[in-house]
Amino acid sequence: MTRTSEGVHSLVAAGAVLAIDLGAIRENYRLLKSRLDGVPAAGLVKAAGYGLDAPAVAHALIREGCNTFFVAHLSEAVALAASIGDKPAIHILNGLAPGAEQECIACGAIPVLNSLEQLDAWRGAARRVGKRLPATLQVDSGMARLGLSPADVKTLAVTSGAFDGIDIVLVMSHLACADEPDSPANEMQLHEFERLRAMLPKAPASLANSSGIFLGKRYHFDLARPGAALYGVNPVPGRPNPMRQVVNLSAKVVQTRNLPAGVGVGYGHSFHTSSLMRTATISLGYADGWPRRAVAAAWFNGVRLPFIGRVSMDSIILDISALPEGRLKGGDLVELIGEHQSIDEVATIAGTIGYEILTSLGGRFHRVHVDRDQEKLAEFIRMRWQG
Ligand SMILES: *Cc1c(COP(=O)(O)O)cnc(C)c1O
């Protein structure tokens, strides 16, 4: 077991602890690779590695042989390149913003060109600097979000010099309904991708995100682009999650109290005690990215402690009557995301998706990155805190 990095807030100063298991991320990467039958997989580390720290995630994946990463913005590429160097490829999904050419060249990132304007700008940059520049081309195979339209692709196919000075290193597209294996949109996008690709310069191809990997071999092409599944989000909703949980979120108890029957609890008194009740107020709220709508539960030593009343900005009130009197004290940690309550379960309660829960997790936590392979994360944190 090695602790590889610590967040800016000390364990004593922070209200909650977010532990990120890099060993589980590596195991998830290996699991996806085993599904891909020899096809390589990139690491999607946009939005700060889905909120879990892009450089830490990237270094963990590099250990597994990953040499291709995707971020969303140039700013993310610059930060990542500073940490992992210029050997692994860093693709920028949103491509080139107007005027960004120079900085993109300087950091060595590969823009995903999504429009004829972006392609023109990159060709112009290559001419100006007098050297060939790498680029990925994205085609819109049926999501209508980003990428060259079928009409754009046709135009390019009959325009001479359209790619002058540019090396197309990848042609990619993105699936709109990969998490719905029965959706006819998947097969339609697959065929459209093949058709559009055939009109472009010959280059390796990429279509599948996490869920796309589970649609089968025909979707794998030359490179898969998993994100969420690496971080433990279920890529096959409605079926058992094949991925390992990566994050553990635990919050500190601020105080406990004994309430008589008939007391209004929290904002708006949305809950009233109906009998004697023991409660604990914990140090985490919607300002930490816990959705206000997610009226869920916390766990302590395997005992479920339901939320009561409303989620506040910095705190949540728990019914701890199931624990013996005095068992839970100020400073004890209760678990909010972990073996008893997954990211996907919290998301379902909040009416959203695991992606949004992950990327919302806030900046006030004590963050620890651990790489533990086998041991249980929750036990590790409890040990650290309780000595
Ligand atoms: C975010 C993203 C991915 C990764 O998707 P997951 O569902 O998180 O695996 C892949 N490709 C593109 C274009 C994306 O924007």
Image: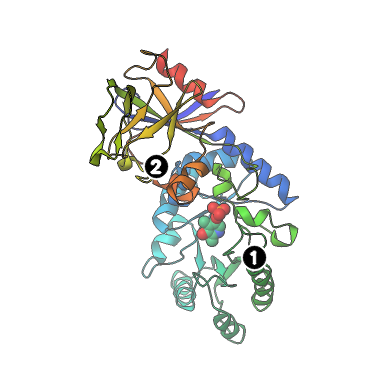
**Amino acid marked by disc 2:** Leu
Whether residues under marks 2 and 1 lie with C-beta atoms below 8 angstroms apart, the answer is no
**Residue 139 appears at what percent x and percent y?**
57, 72
Q: Residues within 10 Å of mark 2 (few under 14, many from 20)?
A: many
User: Which-is-in-front pick, marks 2 and 1?
Assistant: 1
Q: Quadrant of residue 72?
A: bottom left
Examine the rendered structure and indicate whether residue 248 appears above or below residue 380. below
- State left or right for residue 138 relative to residue 317: right
Examine the rendered structure and indicate whether residue 57 appears above or below residue 223. above
Name the mark on residue 44. none
Task: Name the element at disc 2.
Answer: loop
Seen at 49% across and 51% down, the residue is 353
Task: Name the element at disc 1.
Answer: loop
Examine the rendered structure and indicate whether residue 223 appears above or below residue 275. below
Q: Is mark 2 within 8 Å of ligand 1?
A: no
Residue 49 in view here: no
Q: Which residue is mark 2?
A: 361
**Residue 87 appears at what percent x and percent y?**
55, 49
Camera-side residue: 105 or 113? 113
Camera-side residue: 160 or 355? 355
Mark 2–mark 1 distance (CA, rounded to whole Å): 31 Å
Camera-side residue: 233 or 375? 233
**Amino acid marked by disc 1:** Ser
- State left or right for residue 222 relative to residue 55: right
Q: Which residue is mark 1?
A: 183
Seen at 67% across and 69% down, the residue is 190
- State left or right for residue 290 relative to residue 222: left
